[in-house]
């Protein structure tokens, strides 16, 4: 949010430079498209929610990093869902994934008896796997965030391809598509958080858990605030 506020202030102070550095059909046009889509679905929007960073200001992730993130998220999600420590270790060996985990993920994988809350939190990471597979062009559609992802399908895809097969098949989507998705989920998340603050259910059938996890994953994909995975912000 600090970066977004700073960008807005910079645009006021240096309008000429901002106009040169940000293509016309970028941040503001992206915001307009996202707002139009949400309004068509009956999802509340707010005019002063800023546009996210322009495509030129976002981070382009290396394909290998995205593949490794997908596999790491899948493994921690399996352990979170099953609580099976031995299975988690077997999956690390199967996917040659020992170096793929963040510090928090590694601590979870090393713990033979994690807390119930940790298990729940990590089980939600299937949604992040879904985002990564979409970003890699493995999954065709990201779909509306009103239902959980197809976990059996994700498991089947990873089991079939493995780490090397995923690397060979993956084609990271154009950055524009990734930033478009990040802007849209940012606005979905505002609507969900706003409803929660008012003591209401998530609007228009949205699943708040799916929205949060997708926002988290997409913010990492576009390098929001240059944060590492364990420290991603999902501010609205």
Image (cartoon, grey):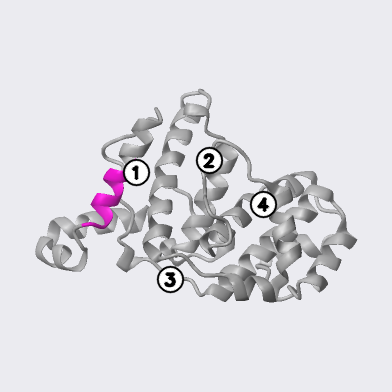
Looking at the rendered image, the quarter that the C terminus falls into is top left
Locate residue 31, reporting x and y percent: 30, 47
Locate residue 61, reporting x and y percent: 48, 71
Q: Which residue bears the numbered disc 4?
A: 126
Q: Which residue bears the numbered disc 3?
A: 60
The dot on residue 34 is: 1
Measure the C-alpha gap from mark 4 to mark 2. Answer: 13 Å
Measure the C-alpha gap from mark 2 to mark 3. Answer: 24 Å
Measure the C-alpha gap from mark 3 to mark 1. Answer: 21 Å
Is residue 184 visible in the rendered structure shown here? yes
Category of crowding for the residue at label 2, using alpha-carbon neighbours closer than 10 angstroms: few (below 14), some (14–19), many (at least 20): many
Asked if residue 28 lies in the magenta stretch, the reply is yes
**Residue at (36%, 61%) from the top-left corner?**
176
Left-right relation of 51 to 75:
left
Q: What are the residue bounds of the magenta stretch?
A: 25-34
Q: Name the N-terminal-most of marks 1 and 4.
A: 1
């Amino acid at each position: 949010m600090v970066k977004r506020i700073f960008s807005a202030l910079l645009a006021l102070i240096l309008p000429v430079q901002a106009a040169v550095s940000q293509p016309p059909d970028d941040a503001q046009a992206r915001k307009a498209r996202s707002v139009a889509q949400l309004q068509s679905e009956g999802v509340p929007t707010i005019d002063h929610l800023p546009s996210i960073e322009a495509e030129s200001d976002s981070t382009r992730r290396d394909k290998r990093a995205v593949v490794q993130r997908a596999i790491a998220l899948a493994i921690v999600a399996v352990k979170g869902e099953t609580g099976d420590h031995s299975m988690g270790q077997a999956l690390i060996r199967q996917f040659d994934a020992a170096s793929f985990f963040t510090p928090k993920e590694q601590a979870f994988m090393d713990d033979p008896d994690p807390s119930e809350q940790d298990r729940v939190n990590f089980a939600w990471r299937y949604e992040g796997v879904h985002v990564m597979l979409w970003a890699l062009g493995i999954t065709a559609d990201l779909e509306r965030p009103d239902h959980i992802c197809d976990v059996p399908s994700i498991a089947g895809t990873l089991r079939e391809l493995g780490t090397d097969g995923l690397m060979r098949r993956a084609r990271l989507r154009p950055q524009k598509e990734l930033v478009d998705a990040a802007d849209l989920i940012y606005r979905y998340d505002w609507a969900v958080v706003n409803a929660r603050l008012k003591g209401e259910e998530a609007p228009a059938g949205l699943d708040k858990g799916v929205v949060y996890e997708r926002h988290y994953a997409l913010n990492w994909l576009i390098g929001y605030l240059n944060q590492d995975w364990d420290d991603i912000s999902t501010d609205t």
